[in-house]
Amino acid sequence: MIKLLIVNLYLFLSFSAMADNLFIDLVDGKNVTEKNVREALKQLRDHKEVKLNKDLLVNPFHHKKEIKDKLKKPFCQNCHLEKPHQVNQRNRSFLNMHTKYISCETCHLNNQVLKLENKWLAYGYPNVGKVIDVYSSVHTEAEKVKTSILPRPGAKISPFNKGKKVVVFKDEKFSIEVEKKWKTLPEEEKARLKASLHKPLNKKGLSCDKCHSENQKVLDFKLLGANQKQTHSITSNDIAQFFGRYKKDGDRLRMSDLLR
Ligand code: HEC
Ligand code: HEC
Ligand code: HEC
């Protein structure tokens, strides 16, 4: 009887520990198909390793680097570069620029079925890992005349589920376990791991117009602390809207289009 109780308690505890992060719950591998695994295996075999450049000998922006070193890294960076977008030459610089203030998960989690709310998450101290309440936090740079809506350095727009962050940082237990497995597992098992980690993710990411349009549904600008002027400037951003308009490879972004 007591044994049964302990087993139940154990199950309950491990379950409640699991439920602490939606992403970790979603990557339990249950929905992974054999096709998913085969595709991942093919990717692993075709994959060309990207060589990381060493840090510059003389860092041009000392101060910025100091801030950056203190920031948490996303779990995705176990395997992906800090600037992960390379394939599409047309938009990759813009996408990589956004990773400074938008979490990977905001653009890459399949959000049709999930109840997610995008808020500012602190990647740095103080309050690392917590939501930044832009209206009450003393650490918010509340000066509303500035053009950026970033409340403070190291803040990223990130999905929350039932008030909990969905983002997993690179130094969290789950991430360290994945890193270990990735280094030691045989190729077939790595393919299965890749497939389960990416099952809840959206390969295509969010296109520009998913945020940069009047009727966008991804961002709640009030919640993010953007005033009307800032909101308008984001939803009517000419560069982002141009990306929605051009379809053919020959289409070019012209300065005259922007200055119209
Ligand atoms: C353990 C390693 C690992 C981790 C962690 C990881 N990825 Fe990947 N990811 C891969 C591999 C391997 C590929 C295959 C493509 C390639 O060759 O780079 C891939 C491919 C992708 C792709 C292209 C579409 C696809 O599914 O093949 C996207 C998008 C992506 N990852 C996003 C993410 C995001 C977002 C995170 C964090 C939430 C993440 N990845 C975490 C290893 C990883
Ligand atoms: C602003 C939205 C946005 C953010 C933030 C974002 N992505 Fe993406 N990502 C995209 C889009 C859109 C694509 C599809 C690009 C294309 O092919 O046009 C993509 C494609 C990818 C790919 C496929 C390979 C490639 O070179 O394009 C990987 C891998 C990837 N993202 C990983 C990440 C990781 C890791 C992060 C966080 C560090 C991240 N993304 C953050 C929108 C985003
Ligand atoms: C997940 C939502 C989201 C997506 C998707 C997205 N953006 Fe943005 N973008 C933002 C937000 C939020 C800002 C405002 C950042 C700030 O105020 O600092 C922004 C800012 C910008 C800016 C202004 C940057 C500056 O420094 O003034 C440009 C240009 C831009 N985005 C272009 C794009 C393009 C091009 C794409 C598609 C390839 C894209 N965005 C996709 C949310 C998004």
Image: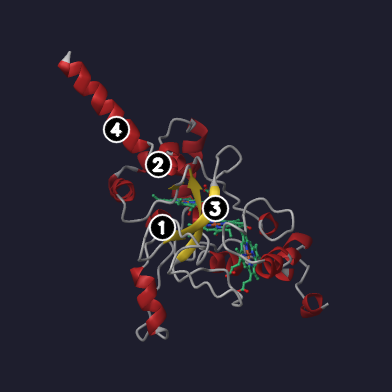
- Answer with mark 4 or mark 1, whichever residue precedes in sequence: 4
Q: Label 2 crowding class (10 Å Cα cut-off): few <14, some 14-19, many 20+?
A: some
Q: Read off the residue under disc 4.
A: 14
Q: Read off the residue under disc 1.
A: 74
Q: Read off the residue under disc 3.
A: 118
| Type of amino acid at the residue the image marks with label 3 | Asn
Q: Cα distance, mark 4 to mark 3?
A: 27 Å
- Answer with mark 3 or mark 2, whichever residue precedes in sequence: 2
* Label 1 C-beta lies within 8 Å of the nearest ligand 2 atom: yes
- What secondary structure is found at the residue carrying circle 1? loop
Q: Read off the residue under disc 2.
A: 24
Q: Cα distance, mark 1 to mark 3?
A: 16 Å
- Answer with mark 4 or mark 3, whichever residue precedes in sequence: 4
Dividing the image into 4 quarters, which one contains the C terminus? Answer: bottom right
Q: Nearer the viewer, residue 83 or 114?
A: 114
Dividing the image into 4 quarters, which one contains the N terminus? Answer: top left
